[in-house]
Image (tube, rainbow, N blue to C red):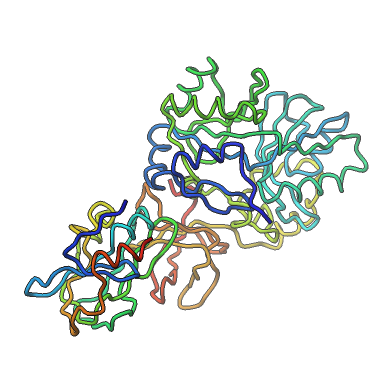
Amino acid sequence: MSEIPDNLGYTEDHEWVGPDEGDGVKVGITDYAQDSLSDVVFVELPNVGDEYQRGEVMAVAESVKAASDIYAPISGKILAINEKLEESPELVNESPYGSGWMVLMKPSEDRSALLDSDSYKNSLD
Amino acid sequence: MPLSQTCLHDNHVRLGAKMVDFAGWNMPIQYTSIVSEHNAVRERVGIFDVSHMGQIFVSGKDASSFLSYVTTWDVNKLSGGDCRYCHILDNEGQIIDDTIVYTFSSQDYMLVPNASMISKVFDWLNLNSSNFEVNVHNKSDEFFCLAVQGPESLRLLRQYFNLSITPFKLIESDNLIISGTGYTGEKGYEIMGPISESQRIWESFLEMGAIPVGLGARDTLRLEKGYLLSGTDFNGSQTTLESGYSWVIDWNHDFIGKEKLLAQKKAGYKSLSGILLEERGVLRPGLQVFLEGEKISELTSGSLSPILKRGIGLSYLDLPIGTTVNVSIRNKQLKGRVIQTPFL
């Protein structure tokens, strides 16, 4: 059973968006996504300062067998990336909502397009 | 066409394996994770169900001269108990399949073709057998095959069968064939026998501590050692010379494809080479390889070595070892180096 924290926003493509931390929102992939990918061995992250529209490919997570695109779950600007993933991509598997976060974004739109935890859970069934 | 299943299919499903279509078979790609299964084989011991592979028996008065004719090795030189890796070539010297020849006696042999090549190899043997007194039987449906691989594998063999095994030798024990062979580069062996015995052996080896390993780790394990994958690294249009496996050719005998290989040896050829990525990234089959801005080839195999934690791949090249090339990944040119396999 995958873990789906109540306080995050989600997309049907299995990204999550964290609560507003004042300086932006953290973005990552869900527990379900990391489990489907299995063994994340490489993560390609965007450059700080890049801007993305919701739904654009902004990163790639690669497992041993396949590469998966990661889409911007919300429009906005990349404020920071999780540099630890360069050395330790397995953090995405070990802690998808914690130390496996991918980017910090400054949203340029509100969160209304995101799913809440219940809707995301239903989308998995 | 419905997918075939091995005799241990339900065991894999019960263990929670992710099942995939491979060469027409529904096979476990991983039970837990490819990386942990890979490491289990390098550090301890893993067990693979490879019952999809074939068992073709060749017997009769001319069996050894026939197999010498249809393979790159002079099978006349093998003695009872010997296993020998070699290639089966077409008239153009191109690899139809790679196989191990199991020698029971000078009139009794077994070949183990890859799953997708069983009927092709069987037909090819029959097509070329008319001048030989031999019987060719495809018994692939009657046999299971389990590969037990890793530094602790020999301890389990002693514990269960009270036997030891030497690399590239075979033992017959009751109705089982145990051979010092594998596809991982580790110490290990493969056990073949009638499918009625498969449950007992699979379950016993799991109880003794062997970790079940799927096709995902089988691929990364073989790629680290530079072993060929049928259908991927050769697909009917590459010769043994090009594959980099000229050591499987015994030039002092006549065999199908020999003339073409001799001609190619004179003319020169590209050969399958290792590429080690020098930047972070994962190599994949089909990625394009560039030399000084010009596309020169594609990768046949590619992955990430779980041990080296680097991208590794194979490609047909005519470049010296050490040459720097670029591999294009998502429109980025990443630097790689041509190296002599094995990678590990």
In the shown orientation, is residue B200 left or right of residue B276? Answer: right
B336 relative to B255 in the view: left or right: left
Quadrant position of residue A40: bottom left
Q: Is residue B166 above or below residue B264?
A: above
Nearest the viewer among A63 and B312 is A63
The residue under the point 41% across, 77% down is B331
Residue B94 versus residue B292: which sits nearer the camera? Answer: B94
Q: Residue at x 69, y 43 (%)?
A: B113
> Is B127 placed left or right of A52 in the picture?
right
Instruction: Say which residue appears at 28% left-offset and 76% top-offset.
Output: A72
> Most extreme residue toward the top, as rendered?
B162
Q: Position of residue B38 (x, y in %)?
A: 41, 43
**What percent of the width, then of the height, locates residue B255?**
80, 46
Residue at the outermost right position: B131
Left or right: B311 as drawn, with respect to B300: left
| Residue B330, image x, y percentages | 41, 74
